[in-house]
Structure formats: C-alpha cells, structure tokens
Amino acid sequence: MGIETKVTFQTEHSGLQDFVKNSVGDYVSLFVDNELLIIVKEVKAGNQTYEKIRMLAGDIARELTKRKIAQVSVKNEELFQAFSALDEQKIIIAFVEGWQLGGYSFESYKSKKSADVTTLTFSDEAAVKPAIIMGRTRAAATAFSRDLMNEIPSTLNPESFPHILEKEFADTNVNVIVHDKQKLQEMQMNGLLTVNRGSKYDPAFIELHYEGDATKPLIALVGKGVTFDTGGISLKSGRDLSDMRMDMGGAAAVAGAVKLLAESNAKVNVVGLIQTVENMPDQHSILPGDIITYKNGHTVQVGNTDAEGRLILADGLIRSGELQAEYVIDIATLTGAIAFALGPKLGGIFGEEELLAEMKKIGDENGDFVWPMPLVDDYDRTLKSNYADFSNISNQASGGSITAALFLRRFVPESTKWIHVDMAGVMESKEKGYYGNSATGFGARLLADYAVHVSK
C-alpha cells in the first residue's frame, strides 16, 4: 500500500489536541493532507519508561502491519522530545525492539500468511544506527525464543532440539556440544535419563559455550527443556494441554540469551546448559515411589512424576559445578504455584537478596519483569522422605514454588552465586503491545542483560 505514513506526537499538532486527548488508547490514526498520521498522545514524565515505548511501538506496528502499510517514518527529535526523561539511544533501542516484536507471528502451519511487518525508518538513521541494530538484535533473540516455544512437539523434541540449535549457531562464535543418551549414562545424568524413560525419543544435554571475554567470570545459564509434559504417570488433566509444548520455555530463554550475547559481541563468558526430555507415560515410565540416585550422591524419591522439571534441572546444576561456574542462573516453567502467587506479568526469582535486587532492576528496564520470592528454610523439612534423602515434592499443600526452589538449592554448587527463575506464569501472553496470542519469549533478555551486568 503506497500511503505515506508517519508516526508523530500530539504536541506537534495543536489543532488536533483535544481530539487526540479525548480519544481512546495511546494514539490515534488520522488522514491529514493525504498522509496517514499515527498521532501519539502525550506521555507524562512520571510515566515514561522503556517498556511504555516498547508496548506503544508494538501496538502501532501490529495495526499498520494488519493494514498492509509497507513503510512508516518517525522523526528522531520528536520521539526524543516525547520521552525526554529517558536516554536517547535507549529510546531508539526500545522502539525498534517493540516494533519488531509487535509484528511477530508464528505461522509455520497456517495456509494463509500475514503481511510482512511494516518497515520502520527514522529521519536521521545514521545518528542512531548502532541503536537500531541493537534493537533488531534484541528482538530477533526474543523472537527465536518465541519460535522455539511455539513449535509443535512432533517437530521440536529431545532428538531434534540439538539439531535446531546446531543449525542456529552454525556460523557464530557459539560452540555447541551435544551429549547423547550414551554420554549421559557415562556422565551419570540420572535425572534426565529417568524422566525421559517413557518417551520414544532419546534425551539430550546441550551445552552452548560463548566466550566473548574468557577473563570474565563463567556464568552458567541452566534451562529446563521438557518439549512436552503430559505429567507422566501422574497424568495431567485438562481440556486443552497444547501449551505443555511450552514446558521448554527455560531452555528457549537460555538459547535466546546466548543468541543475543553472541550477536551483540558481549564481553561475557557464558555457558548455556539445556536439559531436554519428553515426559510421557508408558510401560517404561518412572513410577511414583521410584528413587533416583544423582551423581553427587543425593537420592530422591519421586512423589509425583509431574514434578519432573526439578529432576532434570538438578543434573544441570551439578554440571555447572563441574564447569566451575561462578554464577548459576536456572530458569524453568517450574510451578503453577508461581502463577497463582504473581499472576501472568511477573516471574518469580529466588536466591540471595542482593542478587535478586539487581535482577529485578534489570527486568524493570528490559520488560522481563520479576519479583523476589523468599526461600523459607523451615519449609525445607517438608521435602522429607522416609525412603530416600528427600522427595521431589513437599508434604504441605501450599508454597509450592518455594519448596521447588528449596529442592533445587540442594544441588547448587558450593561457593556459587545462584538465582532460580520460575517463569511458569509468564510463558504465554494475550495480544497487547509487543506481545501476541502466543509464547512470550520471556527470559532471553533478562538472562543476557544480567550476564552483561555481572561481567562489567
């Protein structure tokens, strides 16, 4: 569509002030002098945030894309003036990031495809080129995480997942190491081997090594990669379980974070550790009451096979110790309890208060919002087992996200700085801003930005 289209701001059109101000939403679309103008309402200084910019850009991009508008322009100075309380380069990054993600869609299996996202241009692109590139890079990494989460389980499974990542990182500085079933047996990764027993696919443990600066502290990003979770013998119930393909959201976050770090040439030393399995019920499946012996000597009674994520993350945490990581951040769609506690907008984070405060600040700026949760030591006793060192579930009905974190803490290597991220409540979204009715890609930016922060 050859209509000249511009994004402009309320303050630039005094004659339309009242009309724009009294309209519903953050902006209005009007034809003025044969131009399509997207006129953005004034944003008060106290409400100016980078997330506001991303959400605004995402909404506009989606509307224009649906209208099949080919291109739109924005004046740098108008955008800076509208968000004068914020850093100019970060404004551009956020606007581009939100724009690209606002036009995101997963349509691999649709016969009718949407139009390409409307092209965004700036009046002086040369002045903000690095920021534009960074915005696109951040959006692409998040979109990659979304693609992984949205993919159907017959396409993305424990055997295909390694090949997908090998292809994605083939021409990058990321070294992909895949440990197959035989290697897992040699490495005594008994959590993965046990959880995956009911699947027709073999499990895998994937390592993504990126050394942007080998002198920096090693940061291990540990991601749960359950490509489909039926609950196993402790079978889930529900009308529609199709979103259980997203139970590898933690692994998607790790993969997206490594992609973002590598493509932005970040000066960090990171290893992504992805444990990938499928939790299925059949004659070979693990049974409630079975006991797993881990490489570090811990024995765990399986009280519920639907609490499988912590069983495979344990292997990842042990591996992070073998690699001598100084920082360990695990991330998983781990518990429904965190969704009940925090709702669909916040992930829960557990660990040392100082580390959590830093991560929360990063999430507040980049849009992957998190909230510090307590590790209540007294709840640890509820993991007691009469037949093993401890159980994979608590004997109390409440505090499920906390007891899951306490379970993981038992496997954290000594002298490491550890954070656990429970993203179960934020794995998918409703259409708004730069989010669609699909996977969120949560965690890719959070992990990457946190890695950069601790590597300064």
Image (cartoon, rainbow, N blue to C red):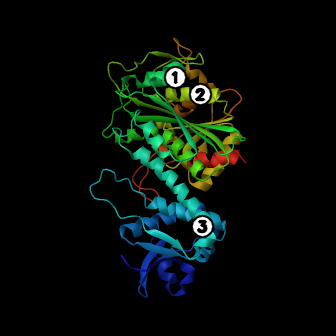
Q: Evaluate if marks 2 and 1 touch, with contact meaning CB atoms under 8 Å apart.
A: yes
Q: In the image, is 16 to the left or to the right of 197? A: right
Question: Which residue carries the number 3 mark?
Answer: 129
Q: Which mark is residue 189?
A: 1
Residue 419 seen in render: no
In this orientation, which residue lies closer to the viewer: 391 or 374? Answer: 391
Q: Tag 3's secondary structure?
A: helix
Identify which residue, 308 or 175, lies in the foreground: 175
Q: Measured from the top left, where is residue 278 in percent x and y?
A: 40, 31
Examine the rendered structure and indicate whether residue 413 appears above or below residue 153.
above
| Label 3 or label 2, whichever comes before in sequence order | 3
Residue in the foreground of this view, choosing between 212 and 154: 212
Q: CA distance from mark 3 to mark 1?
A: 46 Å
* Type of the residue with mark 2: Arg
Task: Kindly report the distance in space between the C-alpha atoms of the residues bearing marks 2 and 1.
Answer: 9 Å
- Corner quadrant of residue 258: top right
Type of the residue with mark 3 = Lys
Q: Secondary structure at mark 1?
A: loop
Give the left or right position of residue 117, taking residue 342 as reference: left
Viewer-proximal residue, 126 or 368? 126
Badge 2 or badge 1: first in the primary sequence: 1
State which tag comes first along the sequence, 3 or 1: 3
**Residue 281 in the image, given as x and y percentages of width and height:** 34, 25
Which residue is found at the position 43% from the left and 44% from the top? 149
**Mark 2 = which residue?**
319
* Residue at the image position 61 percent from the left and 30 percent from the top: 320
Identify the amino acid type marked 1: Met
